[in-house]
Image (cartoon, rainbow, N blue to C red):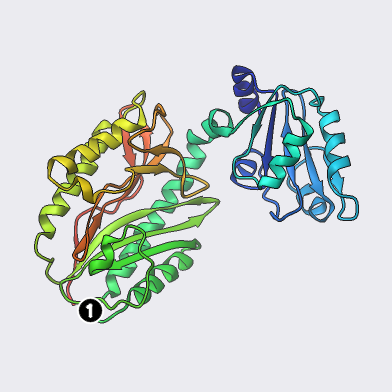
Amino acid sequence: MERLRGVMRAQEVDLVVLGAGAHLWWLTGVRPHADERPLLLCVTLSYAGFLMPSLEAESARQHTNFPFHIWADDQGPDTAFAALLKGADATRTKSIVLDETMRADFAALVQDALPNAARQFTASTIGALRMRKDADEYNKLKRNALTADTAMQAAWAVMRVGMSEDEVADVVRTAFKTQGAAPLFYIVGAGGNGAFPHHHTGETILKSGDAVVMDIGGAMGGYSSDMTRMAVMGTAPDGYQEVHEIVERAVQAAMHAAKPGVRAHVVDDAARGVIIAAGYGEYFMHRTGHGMGIEVHETPYVTASSQTILDEGMVFSIEPGIYLPGRFGIRLEDIVILRKDGPEILSDLPRDLKVIHA
């Protein structure tokens, strides 16, 4: 909270308003049920208090000592919210930061109550703080990365020609659960399906000669994992090895470019430049990376246009890819934490092609 208030002073922000979600959980440790009832945390330089539905109050009280301004369904939130703003001495606020993930009607409640306040979102305040992970967050992210390593290897151990994508995904899900992690996603794209970056895993049968994109992630301890590796069923398809080597060079170029003080687009430029120079630029159609922590996708975003200045402690993916319609796709993804001398990869699993002998 003191770090947030320090940023608020620097940014000349009078009031930060957060809804139920990742920002609130990161700041306070409170993770209430999110529904249509307005539940907001209001933070000024001298006060922090909740607009709290009566249904949530008793449960939420176990996790915070901040004041509650409670409202019930038969009353509505307006009176309680007005009392909260008065108690926070925020009725004449000039500058507010709104949680961009809150419901639109919650944001309207705030803006209607403070019609003369300039509004911005959280990027330069709590968002900027969340980008820089501390030692505890690093340990949780590292543990999650190793859990994903194990889940990937569990899938490789049983993959065979004749299995479906869904059957492979079931192995991944089970491996996460066995380790105490909640499975979050499992893209298994065999053959031509691998050319769809966000393929919906389905009943496609793995065939001899298929290249298989495997993008998996789970969550444990409030943090997440995300990694992509490649496998082939027997012999790789024509042209595969050349493209795999290009994507690997793109990963290495991005790793080399990622330094504290560098703008995020420089990392994207480095990876994209390798792929463009090899003649495959049109087949790399997404950004090079995204931040990760409490959420699988959070700031910083490593895009061609991003002006975010990278700093020590930031955690993000490096995941260039080449997708050849009707043939195969290749994506290699690692999550890194930025150190003073460059990125540290969280996974211990090499990016080498896994050949499945079936």
Give the quadrant of the C terminus: bottom left
Image location (x, y in percent) of residue 123: 53, 32
**Would you name the residue on which mark 1 appears?**
161
- Residues 99 and 245: in front is 99
Front residue (pair 275, 314): 275
Rendered position, 255 above or below 239? above
| Pointer 1 local density, CA inside 10 Å: few below 14, some 14–19, many at least 20 | some
Image-quadrant location for residue 313: top left
The quarter of the rendered structure image containing the N terminus is: top right
| Residue under the image location 63 percent in, 39 percent down | 99
Residue 74 on image: x %, y %: 90, 55
83 horizontally vs 60: left or right: right
Q: How many marks?
A: 1
Vertical arrangement, residue 162 with respect to residue 153, above or below: below
Q: Nearer the viewer, residue 37 or 214?
A: 37
Tell which of 279 and 8 is nearer to you: 279
The residue under the point 25% across, 82% down is: 162
Q: Residue at x 90, y 50 (%)?
A: 75
| Left/right of residue 39 with respect to residue 307 in the rendered view | right
Amino acid on which disc 1 is placed = Val
Q: Where residue 327 appears, x then y in whole percent?
A: 18, 65
